Amino acid sequence: ALVGGLGAGALGGYFFGKKQGESAAEKYEKYWPRKIMMLFGAPGAGKGTQGPKIVDTLDIPQLSTGDMLREAVAAKTEVGKKAQAVMASGGLVSDEIVIGIIADRIKQPDCQSGFILDGFPRTLAQAQALDAMLAKNGEAVSLIVEFSVDPAVLEERICGRWMHKASGRSYHVKFTPPKSMKVGADGKVVPESMKDDLTGEALYQRSDDTAEALKTRLDAYKNQTLPILEHYKDKGIVKKVDGGKDIKDVWTEVQAKLVSK
Ligand code: AMP
């Protein structure tokens, strides 16, 4: 009876201890590394299209420095005033500004389980600043999905793109037209007919989505952004997908890369 009593007590204590302790989900949050992902690719490669699907799958936010800067421009903040002209021409905003924006953003509670970087880092200096920020907490980038796309495809994608401001949803006159799209007698789309499928709100074209600004954006990508891949290559975290396929097929490839092995 004594032994049985002890056993029951010890067992009770064990279960009690478990109940008082952390749940599996809490332990995961506390001890496992955050998923820190980077979407990498030229303008029009599909980062903004595939990003929201990753958000839905992993429940972590997509942080787009381009979206944040466009909001700053619209709100006419100090950052917005500094960024406006260079963004319109397709050049890069200063490292100091975007590093500051990201440093503040990743401290927010919604980034607790991880985050997806879209459009950042764009220069080696930004990548190094990011690494240093993360290293302070013993963290590092865990996955880079590289969207590789033929440059000829990029121009067609960018120049036919229409965006919904509030959600960031993008449409394309040829590949993914909104249900409301009308084409005039001249064969051109009627701008007033371009409405978001879900909200019915007007779509707009980005001021830098022109063939001319795209040239500058692609130059910046090639000269300043691509070297970042070299920087992370040896860490074995860069996974390449063929971003030239259609949206569904690219998503199938991306999903396979999200699984940690
Ligand atoms: P995106 O929406 O990512 O194509 O960004 C639009 C524009 O915002 C870029 O062409 C740059 O002018 C600016 N921008 C966005 N992210 C960055 C960044 N990480 N570094 C510098 N400029 C950026």
Image: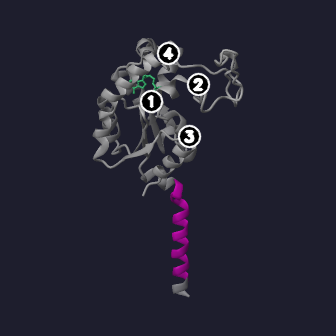
Q: Which mark is residue 163?
A: 2
- Dot 2: element: strand
Label 2 to label 4: alpha-carbon separation: 16 Å
165 or 182, which is in the foreground?
182
| Residue contact between numbered discs 1 and 3, judged by CB atoms under 8 Å | no
Number of the front mark, 2 or 1: 1
* Residue 22 is inside the magenta segment: yes
Disc 2 or 3, which lies upstream in sequence? 2
Residue 16: quarter of image:
bottom right
Disc 3 or 4, which lies upstream in sequence? 4
Q: Which mark is residue 247?
A: 3
Give the amino acid type for the residue marked by disc 1 in the picture.
Ala
| Residue 29 image point, x, y percent | 48, 50
Disc 2 or 1, which lies upstream in sequence? 1
136 shown above or below 256: above
Q: The C terminus is located in which quarter?
A: bottom left
| Residue contact between numbered discs 2 and 3, judged by CB atoms under 8 Å | no
- Dot 3: element: helix
Magenta range is 5-25
Number of the front mark, 1 or 4: 1
Label 1 to label 3: alpha-carbon separation: 17 Å
Number of the front mark, 3 or 4: 3
Residue drawn at 41 percent across, 49 percent down: 33
- Dot 4: element: helix
| Residue 71 image point, x, y percent | 52, 20
Q: Residues within 10 Å of mark 2 (few under 14, many from 20)?
A: some
Q: Which mark is residue 152?
A: 1
